[in-house]
Image (spheres, rainbow, N blue to C red):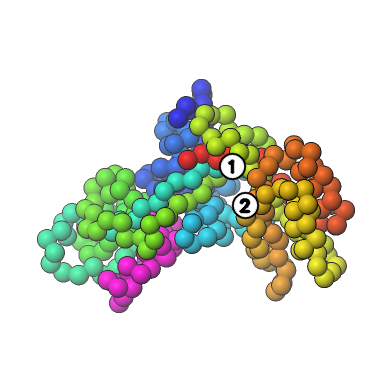
């Protein structure tokens, strides 16, 4: 895949060899990548202008949306999505090479909460009574295992993490379902598309819609009708708490069309007429 002609700085959820790092290397030059310990750190880095882009996980095929990413985008940033990349996810169980002789038992399993959840059945069957320790990323778990050889612990992560931190993969492909992909989004302060080759060619626009204050009956049906009669395809609709009280939500809607399309402009006008608060994260393309 062609890279940008310059080397932009890109914040990603690190450390090196995280799944986000793998996704970032598919779109950007390795020289510009800057690891950050948490998703909020990545978002704040691009919001403050310390980096040109941030790439963070948005949704997993097995575990759904990443709430931390969505909530920070809605409540705490003024960013736009410039690209999306869908990456296959394979989870492996890895241990320090000092503990490959089979003696002793694993005392705890470390990984990101989503990775632990993606391997729930495997962990229930093999490590039902073993503590599961959450980390900020799968790579952080692998790094911790490498740095603590005195402990009989395991990490769940990708093959690159095992290579990077010199760990032994004791069991491969432990995720519960075969089709396991994660959507990552590239964020920036500007609205526009990432200028690199290899995207799908199908534009996508992400909207966050807040319902009218009067909370009248049938308003969600009205909102969906705005898109339906215009034949605008919705690839996703999801609700998230507004954090203002029980029963108060906003909706994340992915529309498979450019926001510059006449039908999309008409849809935005009709949503405003319905007294909805709408925020567009821009139009972008998906890479694989």
Residue at left 53%, top 29%? 196
Residue that lies at the very extreme toward the bottom in this rendered image: 129
- Residue 144 lies, in percent from the top left, at 31, 56
Side of 171 where 28 appears, left or right = right
In the rendered structure, find residue 5 and report the number of the disc placed on it. none
Quadrant of res 23: top left
Q: Residue furthest right?
A: 273
Image quadrant containing the N terminus: top left
* Foreground of the two, 251 or 107: 251
Residue 53 drawn at (x, y percent): 56, 38
| Residue 128 in the image: above or below residue 87 | below
The residue at the point 15 percent across, 58 percent down is: 100
Q: Residue at x 80, y 64 (%)?
A: 219
Q: Which residue is mark 2?
A: 235
Q: Which residues are magenta?
A: 112-138
Question: Does the magenta run of residues contain 129?
Answer: yes
- Quadrant in which residue 223 is drawn: bottom right
Q: Please tell me whether mark 1 sits on a helix, a strand or a loop.
A: strand
Give how far across and how far down residue 74 sits, in percent.
Answer: 67, 54
Camera-side residue of 174 and 71: 174
Distance, label 2 to label 1, CA atoms, is: 20 Å
Question: 285 and 278: which one is in front?
Answer: 285
Q: How many marks?
A: 2
Q: What SS does tag 2 mark? A: strand
Query: Is residue 198 in sight in this rendering?
Result: yes
- The residue at which mark 1 appears reads as 187
């Amino acid at each position: 895949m062609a890279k940008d002609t310059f080397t932009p700085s890109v914040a990603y959820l690190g450390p090196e060899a995280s799944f986000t790092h793998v996704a970032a290397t598919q779109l950007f030059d390795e020289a510009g990548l800057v690891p950050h310990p948490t998703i909020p750190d990545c978002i704040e880095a691009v919001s403050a202008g310390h980096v040109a882009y941030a790439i963070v996980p948005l949704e997993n095929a097995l575990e759904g949306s990443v709430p931390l990413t969505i909530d920070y985008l809605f409540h705490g940033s003024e960013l736009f999505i410039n690209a999306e990349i869908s990456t296959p996810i394979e989870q492996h169980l890895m241990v320090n090479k000092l503990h490959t002789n089979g003696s002793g038992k694993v005392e705890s399993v470390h990984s990101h909460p989503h990775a632990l959840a993606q391997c729930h059945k495997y962990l229930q069957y093999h490590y039902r009574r073993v503590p599961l320790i959450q980390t900020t990323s799968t790579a952080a778990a692998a790094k911790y295992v490498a740095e603590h050889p005195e402990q009989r612990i395991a990490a769940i992560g990708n093959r690159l993490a095992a290579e990077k931190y010199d760990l032994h993969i004791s069991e491969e492909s432990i995720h519960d379902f075969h089709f396991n992909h994660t959507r990552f989004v590239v964020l920036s302060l500007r609205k526009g598309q990432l200028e690199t080759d290899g995207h799908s060619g199908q534009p996508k626009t992400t909207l966050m819609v807040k319902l009218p204050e009067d909370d009248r009956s049938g308003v969600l049906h009205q909102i969906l009708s705005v898109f339906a009669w215009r034949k605008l395809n919705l690839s996703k609709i999801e609700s998230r708490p507004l954090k203002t009280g029980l029963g108060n939500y906003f909706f994340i809607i992915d529309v498979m069309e450019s926001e510059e399309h006449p039908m999309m402009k008409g849809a935005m006008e009709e949503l405003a007429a319905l007294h909805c608060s709408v925020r567009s994260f821009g139009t972008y393309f998906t890479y694989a």
